[in-house]
Image: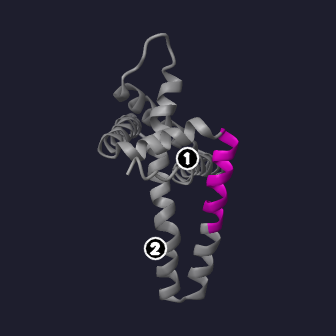
């Protein structure tokens, strides 16, 4: 039989996990803001990608490379060749991870701006924190694993699509600009 003290302890652990998760989610938005401050040119590419491309194209251009990378990673693992697996990691997974980070730099403040949409212009920290919080709350969907997988694939695909769209849409500098 479970005692009231044990039930209270379980409830406190759950509350602690929720509070720490919310703090972590807001911190995730702050990290995106920090990266935007350190790499403003990269952040501008992500913002331009968000402005230029519609959501369906961003999702499609992000999910397809993720699925391809997962299949290639599975094949590399099945082959048992460490050199091939290392090459896949460096040539496929590393660029996708960088595209994911670039996409998150643009998507998190954008998402926060959509959430905070009001007559008053929100600060960059407020937008990034709200975007991180929404992203963190979306990960609660992992309580139902099939839904968690779907949300994660869509979110990662959106971010990778933004990152790839920013890099692919970059126009080279003209000699006058160089």
**Can you see residue 97?**
yes
* Residue drawn at the location 44% of the way across and 51% of the way down: 101
Q: Which residue is mark 1?
A: 162
* Residue drawn at the location 66% of the way across and 38% of the way down: 54
**Can you see residue 140?**
no
Q: Do the residues under discs 1 and 2 have CB atoms within 8 angstroms?
A: no
- On the image, the x and y values in percent for residue 81 come to 53, 89
Tell me the chief SS of the magenta region.
Answer: helix
Circle 2 SS class: helix
Say which of 43 and 63 sits in front: 43
Residue 119 is left or right of residue 4, and the answer is: right
Separation of residues labelled 1 and 2 (CA atoms): 21 Å
* Residue drawn at the location 60% of the way across and 38% of the way down: 52
Task: Tell me if residue 145 comes above or below residue 124 in the rendering.
Answer: below
Residue 44 is left or right of residue 60, and the answer is: left
Q: Is residue 96 magenta?
A: no
Q: How is the image coloured?
A: one colour
**Range shown magenta:** 54-68
* Residue drawn at the location 61% of the way across and 45% of the way down: 151
Q: Which residue is mark 2?
A: 90
């Amino acid at each position: 039989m479970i005692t009231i003290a044990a039930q209270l302890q379980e409830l406190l652990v759950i509350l602690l996990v929720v509070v720490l998760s919310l703090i972590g989610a807001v911190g995730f938005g702050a990290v995106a803001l920090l990266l935007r401050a350190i790499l403003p040119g990269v952040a501008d590419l992500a913002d331009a990608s968000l402005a230029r491309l519609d959501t369906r194209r961003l999702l499609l251009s992000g999910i397809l490379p993720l699925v391809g990378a997962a299949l290639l990673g599975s094949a590399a693992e099945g082959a048992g060749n460490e050199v091939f697996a290392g090459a896949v990691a460096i040539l496929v997974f590393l660029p996708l991870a960088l595209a994911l980070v670039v996409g998150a730099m643009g998507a998190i403040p954008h998402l926060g701006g959509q959430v905070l949409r009001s007559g008053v212009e929100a600060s960059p920290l407020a937008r990034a924190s709200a975007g991180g919080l929404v992203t963190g709350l979306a990960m609660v969907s992992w309580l139902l694993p099939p839904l968690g997988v779907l949300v994660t694939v869509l979110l990662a695909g959106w971010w990778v699509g933004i990152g790839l769209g920013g890099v692919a849409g970059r126009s080279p500098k003209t000699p006058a600009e160089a």
